Image (spheres, helix red, strand yellow):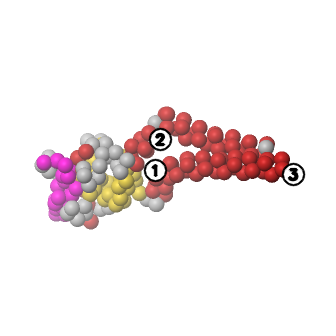
Amino acid sequence: MKEKSVRRGISLLFRGAGLFLILAALVMMLPFVLPRFFGYETYRIVSPSMAPAVPQGSLVLVREAEGEEIAEGEIIAFYRNGTVVVHRALENDPSQETIITKGDANAEADLEELAYPELIGRVIYHAPYLGDLGEILSSFGGRIYLFTLIGCAALCFLLAERV
């Protein structure tokens, strides 16, 4: 009788460990996958040009917007020479369909005005350090780590059935 309860306890322990590992993998992936289902894009901040408002290494959540909707002071994302830039809108000129932008940490406004077609949208949220985590998880080593977590979880569930 006692041996049966010990086996049941070990089985529950393995199931709990497996569930924990699966949830850990999901929690690590959700911030990078879930926003896309709701029409948002995510980007990693790679330069300190928006510090301290948006620190380097942050993950920003961007919602699509039209150029004429952008208000002065909003943080926006746009394309510049093939890369995504996140800066603050200083002035919006709907008649010229241009926006003057500036990084908060930069002394001067950006040299080039932003044309409306280059606009991606407005930044609605940023999470410090989460961009760096996303970079790590999307690397080869990070993917190995996630697959290892899922493999360990599967092993725990298997052991729970065998005990």
Q: What residue type is labelled 1?
A: Phe
Q: Nearer the viewer, mark 1 or mark 3?
A: 3
| Mark 1 element type | helix
Task: Judge whether 93 appears above or below 80 on screen.
Answer: below
Residue 104, x across and y down, in percent: 20, 52
Residue nearest the viewer, comparing 114 with 145: 145
Which residue lies most toward the top here?
141
Image quadrant for the C terminus?
top right
Residue drawn at (75%, 50%), measured in percent from left and top? 9
Image: magenta residue range? 88-107
Which disc is residue 137 wearing? Answer: 2
- Would residue 115 be seen by someone viewing this image from the given angle? no
Residue 129 horizontal/vertical position (percent): 37, 47
- Which residue is farthest front? 2
Whether residue 108 is visible to the viewer of this picture, yes or no, is yes
Residue 101 shown in magenta: yes
Instruction: Write the residue at 40% across / 48% down.
Output: 130
| Front: mark 3 or 2 | 3
Residue assigned mark 3: 1
Left or right of 10: which side holds 27?
Answer: left
Q: Earlier in the sequence, mark 1 or mark 2?
A: 1
Residue highlighted by disc 1: 32
At numbered mark 2, what does the secondary structure look like: helix, strand or loop?
helix
